[in-house]
Image (cartoon, rainbow, N blue to C red):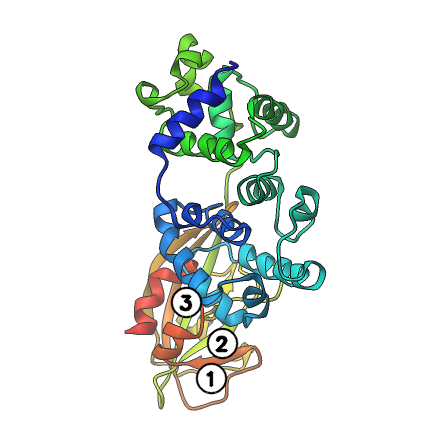
Amino acid sequence: MEHIAPALLQWFGQNRRTLPFREDPTPYHIWVSEIMLQQTRVAAALPYYERFIRELPDIPALAACPPDRLDKLWEGLGYYRRVHSMQQAAQVVCREYGGQLPADYDKLLALPGVGPYTAGAIASIGFGLAVPAVDGNVLRVFARLYNDPSPITDPAVKKTFTRRVMDHQPPDAPGDYNQALMELGALVCLPGGAPLCGSCPLAGLCQGRRAGTARSLPCKPQPKPRRMVPVTVALVRRQDTGEWLLQKRPAGGLLAGLWQPPAFEGERLDAPGAAAALAAMGVQTDPDSAQPLPASRHIFSHVEWQMTGWQLSAPQQQPPEGCVWAGPEQLQTGYALPGAFKAYRKFLLG
C-alpha cells in the first residue's frame, strides 16, 4: 500500500482533465467549482462556472451581488441553498478576512455552507495544506482498495476511511493527491458496480479486485422511500399585458426565497378549485379561461412533487403581496425559475 501515492500521482499527471479551475486554481475558483460540483456533473457545470466567474470574479463581487441576480446566475444548477450559503460566507470573508479566504482549514470549515470536504479541497488545492478532501469518489476508491464493506454513510466509518486517506497523502503534494483520488473515482473507479479495473493505476494493489468484490462496493444502506406530494401549478396570464404571475416562496424551507408560478402543495385541484385558491391569494381570474397543463414531476432528495395544473387568464389588476407580473424578457433575464417547473417554462416564454 505504500506505493499508492506515487502510482496515483503519475497516473494523474498523464490523465488529468483540463478544467478551468485547475488551470487557475485560486482558492476562490476552487470554492466555486466545488460547491457547483456537489450535485452536478463536471460537463454540465462548466458553462455555469465560467459565467459565474465572469460576472462575479472575486469574493467582494459575490458578497455584493443582488439576490435575484445571484439566483439567475445559478438557475439550472438547482439546490439554491448552496449559492445562498456561499454569499453568506463571502460576506463573512469580507468582514473578517479582507475579502480573501483564510489559509486555515478550521476557519474555512466555520464558514456558512462549507463542510469538511469543501474546506479540505480549498485548503489542499488552493493553499497546499496537508488536509484530507474526502468525497463520495474517494470513499468508493478506498472501500474497494481495502475491500472494506463497512457502510460509508456511517460517520465513524468515514473517519476511518479519512485516516487511511491521510496515511498515504504525500505532504509535499496534498492538493494533487486529493485531486488524483477524486479523478480516479470520476473516470476509472466508477459507481454502480462498473469499475474500469483494466485502466486503474492501483489495480495491482486493490484488495477488492483481488477478492472479486470491487463491483459490490462500497456498501450503502437502502435509501428511505420518497414522500409523494401532489402539487397544483397555476400559470396566470394577464390579459392586457401578456405578463405572467410569479410568487416568491417563503424565506425558509424547500426552494427558499425563489420565484415560481403560484403552486399549491399538497393539493390536486380541479379548475374551479385552482381559481378559488388564486382568489384566496387575492388574484381574480376568468372562470372560463382554464386550460389543463401537462402533468410533470420533480424529485428532490426526499420528496417527489407530482404536478398537475391549469393555465388561466386574469383581468388587469395589481399583484397581491409577495407576487409580481413578469413578461418573457424579465423571465429570461431577471427571475430565476426553479428546475422543478422546467416543464412549464415553454408556456411562460412562448
Q: x, y percentage for residue 49?
A: 42, 56
**Crowdedness near tag 1: few (<14), some (14–19) or many (≥20) residues, C-alpha within 10 Å:** many
N-terminal-most mark, 1 or 3: 3
Is there CB contact under 8 Å for labels 1 and 3?
A: no
Closest to the camera, between mark 1 and mark 3, is: 1
User: In this picture, is 340 found above or below 257?
Assistant: above
Quadrant in which residue 131 is drawn: top right
N-terminal-most mark, 2 or 1: 2
Q: Amino acid at mark 3?
A: Asp
Observer-nearest of 78 and 74:
74
Is there CB contact under 8 Å for labels 2 and 1?
A: yes
- Label of residue 284 in the image: 1
Give the CA distance from mark 3 to mark 2.
12 Å
Q: x, y percentage for residue 313?
A: 37, 81
Observer-nearest of 277 and 337:
337
Residue 218 visible within the image = no
Kind of element beneath mark 2: helix
Q: Amino acid at mark 1?
A: Gln
Taking 267 as reference, is 191 left or right?
left
Residue at (51, 61) in percent of width and height? 265
Is there CB contact under 8 Å for labels 3 and 2?
A: no
Q: x, y percentage for residue 251?
A: 62, 65
Label 2 belongs to which residue? Answer: 278
Taking 234 as reference, is 349 left or right?
left
Label 3 belongs to which residue? Answer: 270
* Residue situated furthest left in the rendering: 350
Residue at (40, 89) in percent of width and height? 315
Residue 265 visible within the image = yes
Q: Amino acid at mark 2?
A: Leu
Q: x, y percentage for residue 155?
A: 64, 30
Taking 51 as reference, is 92 left or right?
right
